[in-house]
Image: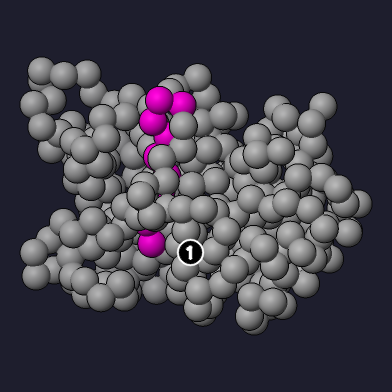
Amino acid sequence: MGLAVGVDLGGTKIAAGVVDDAGKVVARARRDTPAGPYAAVDAIAELVRELDAGGLPVGVGVAGFVDVTRRRVLFAPNLGWPEVPFAETVADRLGGPVVLENDANAAAWAESRFGAGAGVRDMVLVTVGTGIGGGIVLDGALMRGGFGIAGEFGHLALVADGRSCPCGQVGCWEQYASGGALSRAARDRGVEDVADALEEGNPTALELLAEVGTWLGVGLAAVAAVLDPAVIVIGGGVVENGELLLSPARAEFRRRLPAAEHRPVAEIRPAALGPAAGLVGAADLARAAN
């Protein structure tokens, strides 16, 4: 049984786990994310020691742009980092090779290997959380693009002269089809706690969730027009609302898909691995590289 360590480095927490070659997490540990990249390196080293995982391959999924060589973090806005030679720094600290990957790419790989996309050679993961992220697996391989930054679906420009986005553009998909968009719309309609309102069946909250689902379908049709995946997997916290989100997304996806009546239509599935997907995928990528 080939074990590897996966690390999911996010803006608020670092989750780590020892993962077997069937994608099962056999041991877990976590820390709050400290300020600065070198403090994060210290925290990862502590987690590896806590897991008694010295000598195992290590993969790190990070919330940011990772260069095509998987060595450097080019930009990590949620972490406040500039460009950092992160893989080399972690490897020096641990005394062994480290694979670095974007967190959504790592999650997409995990879903393709062990989750909702298992057995499918062409699939896309779209994560719907505060924003929208994603990853692409084509012909059984993770597609990273010429510079390592493929799959930034949230910044597809869907609305001309639309809402401003922190990326510097306007009309980005995640401004209409994300948890952040849902929360903003709910507040504008006088719903302060959208999660509680949805649980209580509040009609306004349900209507707003359906609107987010509809916008999700709009963007998924654009993704499918370019990539033609057999399966689209939807992950992230908002997917916990199940068919309340996915049913309007599927309907709008079919309505917007070019020539839908003349082509196979991709299946839209909820993700299977939950919050562990990032660390599972990072571990599997590290295992494959060693």
Query: Which residue lies at the image location 67% right of the left edge and 43% below the top edge?
Result: 286
User: Which SS does the magenta portion mostly show?
Assistant: strand
Query: Which residue lies at the image location 21% right of the left edge and 38% below the top edge?
Result: 226
Amino acid on which the number 1 mark rests in the picture? Gly
Q: Is residue 45 left or right of residue 168?
A: right
- Kindly indicate the quadrant of the structure image that contains residue 131: bottom left
Q: Position of residue 3 (x, y in %)?
A: 79, 36
- Secondary structure at numbered mark 1: loop
Asked if one can make out residue 76 in the rendered structure from this viewpoint, the answer is yes
Q: Position of residue 75 (x, y in %)?
A: 46, 70
Asked if one can make out residue 248 in the rendered structure from this viewpoint, the answer is no
Residue highlighted by disc 1 = 64
Mark 1 is surrounded, within 10 Å at the Cα level, by few (under 14), some (14 to 19) or many (20 or more) other residues, namely many
Q: Is residue 40 left or right of residue 112?
A: right
Q: Is residue 26 left or right of residue 62?
A: right
- Kindly indicate the quadrant of the structure image that contains residue 25: top right
Q: Which residues are magenta?
A: 131-140
Instruction: Give the number of callouts.
Output: 1
Q: Quadrant of the N terminus?
A: top right
- Kindly indicate the quadrant of the structure image that contains residue 260: top left
Query: Outermost residue, right direction?
Result: 52
Q: Nearer the viewer, residue 114 or 182?
A: 114
Q: Nearer the viewer, residue 289 or 253?
A: 289
Q: Position of residue 100 (x, y in %)?
A: 60, 54
Q: Quadrant of the C terminus?
A: top right
In the rendered image of this protein, does residue 290 appear above or below residue 8? above
Q: Nearer the viewer, residue 289 or 134?
A: 289
Coloring scheme used: one colour
Q: Position of residue 219 (x, y in %)?
A: 23, 47
Is residue 32 magenta-colored? no
Is residue 132 magenta-colored? yes
